Amino acid sequence: MLEQKSELIPVLEQIEKEKGIKKEEILKVIEGALVSAYKKHVGRDVNVEASVDLVSAQVQAFVIKKVVENVTNPNQELSLKDAKALVAEAKMDDEIRIPLDTQEFSRIAAQTAKQVIIQKIRESERLSLYEEFKLKEGSIISGVVYKFVEGNVIIEIGKSEGILPVKEQVFSEKFRVGERLKVLIAAVEKSPRGPRILLSRNRPELVKRLFEMEVPEIYEKIVEIVAVVREPGIRSKIVVRSNNLKVDPVGACVGIKGSRVKPIIDELRGERIDLVLYSNDPITYISSAFSPAKVLYVNVVDKEHKRAEVIVKDDMLSLAIGKRGANVNLVCKLTGWKIDVRSETQKKETTAVLKEMTVEELSKLPGVGKKIAEVLVKTGWKDIGKISKAKPEDFTVLQGVGEKTAQKIIASAVEYIENQGKITEESQPKVESSVEEKENATSKEESKPE
């Protein structure tokens, strides 16, 4: 037996303190290591059991053998006679635990045990780190830039390192060694060298977590973050609502003189932050989402397919669209609507174009021609705006109009409106020179029996 309490216990306590691994867990590692060392010393097929007492530090080891009539494997079996010599009550098929003198461990076995213990402790430490960071997945952590590897940024976070891949970085951000920054723990995976911690600086969740850190009302669930959309490095939009009528959710997130939102903007290196008040009404919601641009009004073009038109003042158009279309793109993501933004002037020009047209005017549209124009006017299709929003099946029911012709009619109407009522010179010749022939050919083709 080993009775070196003065040596073993302090070692266990030191490992527990430095590595954060509990003594009980270390004992299991040591017991497994002792078994491995003994098996390597005397044979892999020996059934060995070892235990270490945490209080006394005594090691007990046993070889377990089965009582059989005829012994064929001395490492695992023993005769009934030999068994009774050890345990008087022994009988066939019993498993006898034979105490081992731990002094049998030679220098080689002891060294092997030491190596296995070190290995097991490292494995346990890696598992402990993995479990620690796995629980933090989706949260924010502060780290220090350590080095750069092929564009990836290696960041020291606590006792481990995380990787900020190129695809998780913001295109406009540059880092320097020793710089401290906040990152999102995007994913934690197991690997032979320890946990692989994937970090991110460009995900919407980073913005959400930053607000949760800065705004107590969010933590207390008085203010709720409904949604977050982001164009990393350019602009983020955060939709909020209040569960308390007395609390303004936008004001709570901004803070007095911007005291709460400013640290977030600084952490994101100047990225614009728009706070949007949530509304169940699509028109109100869309209008609010365009902040900081002020919307004059919203036209719902197609409620079923969620298409809308937003009108702003002329000097607000560029702000409403945003840098590289960021603002309008974020509004579309946020609301789930497809939105066209127009200035007052553009709207007036478009409205002037949307009128009822004569046969002569319709016949000038590319792909229409006089005969089709007459059919359209006769059946009530005079409004160019309605024609542009129609579906091919609205026209294929008309005499002499097939699928291709219907598509041409709609496309021509859309082009006419986009060009503010002007018919391009490129498309004009196609109308008079070939439309009649094409329509006659189309009529003949469509009149053929299936």
Image: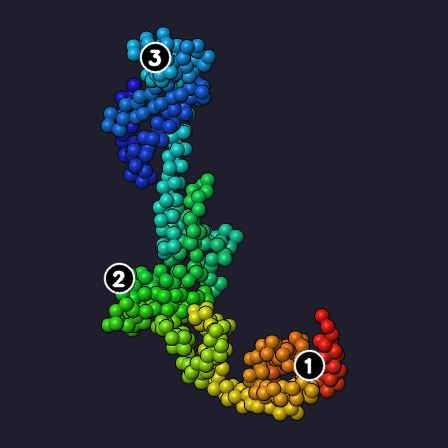
Q: Secondary structure at mark 1?
A: loop
- Quarter occupied by the N terminus: top left
Mark closer to the chain start, 2 or 3:
3
Relative placement, left or right, of 7 versus 35 is: left
Q: Secondary structure at mark 3?
A: loop
**At 30% across and 37% down in the image, what residue appears?**
22
What residue does disc 1 label? 400
Residue 413, image quadrant? bottom right
Q: Which one is closest to the eye, mark 1 or mark 3?
A: 1
What residue does disc 3 label? 91
Q: Which one is closest to the eye, mark 1 or mark 2?
A: 1
Relative placement, left or right, of 352 versus 437 is: left
Q: Choose between 344 and 306: the one closer to the eye.
A: 306
- The local crowd at label 3, few if under 14, some if 14 to 19, many if 20 or more residues have their Cα within 10 Å, is some
Q: Amino acid at mark 2?
A: Glu
- Quarter occupied by the C terminus: bottom right
**Residue 29 point in image, percent of width and height:** 36, 31
Q: Choose between 98 and 306: the one closer to the eye.
A: 306
What residue does disc 2 label? 220
Spatial distance from mark 1 to mark 3, Cα to Cα?
102 Å
Mark closer to the chain start, 1 or 3:
3
**Residue 382 point in image, percent of width and height:** 59, 88
| Up/down of 40 relative to 70, above or below | below
